[in-house]
Amino acid sequence: MSLQTERNQDATVYVGNLDERVTVELLWELMVQAGPVVNVHLPKDRVTQQTQGYGFCEFRSEADASYAVKIMNMIKLYGKPIRVNKALADKKPTDVGANVFISNLDYSVDEKQLYDTFSSFGNIISMPKIVRDLETGNSKGYGFISFDNFESSDMAIESMDGQYLNNKKIVVNYALKKDGKGERHGSAAERLLAAESKKNNFDNSVYSEGMAVGGGNPLHQHAPIHPVQMQPLPIMQSYGGAGPGVGVPIPGQQMYYSYGHQYPHNPGYQH
């Protein structure tokens, strides 16, 4: 089938930061723990025929896709935390400049801990980046996080600057721009551009939704997701090694066993 024309976008999740060893079968096996899977697609390079580190998983329903985002985002496959996000399924989120620099990090802090710590302030648009030594892979003690709006980045800086993370007081500020002039993100010009972009996106989305419902109320609200899908469940943490590894059981949560691996079980989906 044509993925571009027939895929149900509302029921599809983007899966990124995949190790090259991840196959369609393995990704299907993982995602089916969230709900019935219709299709898994891993784009390949036309020349090398190697996967490109990302893919798409279509579920039977939008609720299953939402549940997958909640329980699968940032779990580790082959030692790499994968990114599962519905917002990235069709286009890369806009980098508005709400980019935060975190320094004086304890060397034990990894990307998942940064994500877990800072995602409470807003939507993080890309994988948190910890700068590492190219030879050893060890953290250099600083990293970056990009939010999709300045309200979130402002709150993160205000709340976390000077706080302790793994017993070290971290420093949180806006990151320097890449042009080398010493200016930091968060300028008035960036904020104005972000506000204009947000307004344009809102106008376009309202128009599109109004057309989709046949000229009805353009602010039409979709039916709420079943309460099971809305429960904030902790994310499974893998030990990371050479393979997907065995997850750490979460107290009180049912786990589903498949070929030696553990995954959180969707209580709303019967296998």
Image: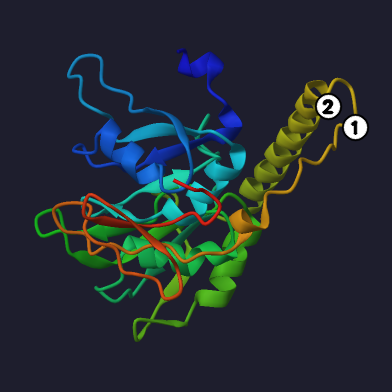
Do callouts 2 and 1 mark residues in contact (Cβ within 8 Å)? yes
Q: Quadrant of the N terminus?
A: top left
Distance CA(mark 2)–CA(mark 1)? 6 Å
Q: Earlier in the sequence, mark 2 or mark 1?
A: 2
* Residue 98 visible to the viewer: yes
| Residue that appears at 56% across and 66% down | 120
Q: Secondary structure at mark 1?
A: loop
Q: Secondary structure at mark 2?
A: helix
Q: Quadrant of the C terminus?
A: top left
Q: Is residue 118 above or below residue 158?
A: above
| Residue that appears at 64% across and 47% down | 189
Most foreground residue, 36 or 196: 36
* Residue 191 coordinates in the image, percent (x, y): 66, 50
Q: Residue furthest right?
A: 216
* Residue 154 coordinates in the image, percent (x, y): 61, 65
* Residue 151 coordinates in the image, percent (x, y): 66, 60
Q: Amino acid at mark 2?
A: Gly
In the rendered structure, the answer to whether residue 194 lies left or right of residue 112 reads right
What scheme was used to colour the molecule? rainbow
Q: Residue furthest left?
A: 135
Mark linked to residue 235: none
Q: Amino acid at mark 1?
A: Asn
Mark 1, residue position: 217
| Residue that appears at 78% across and 23% down | 212
Q: Residues within 10 Å of mark 1 (few under 14, many from 20)?
A: few
Mark 2, residue position: 210
* Residue 43 coordinates in the image, percent (x, y): 33, 24
Q: Is residue 49 above or below residue 198?
A: above
Q: Residue furthest front?
A: 270
In the rendered structure, the answer to whether residue 225 lies left or right of residue 65 reads right
Q: Is residue 155 above or below residue 263?
A: below
In the rendered structure, the answer to whether residue 258 lies left or right of residue 233 reads left
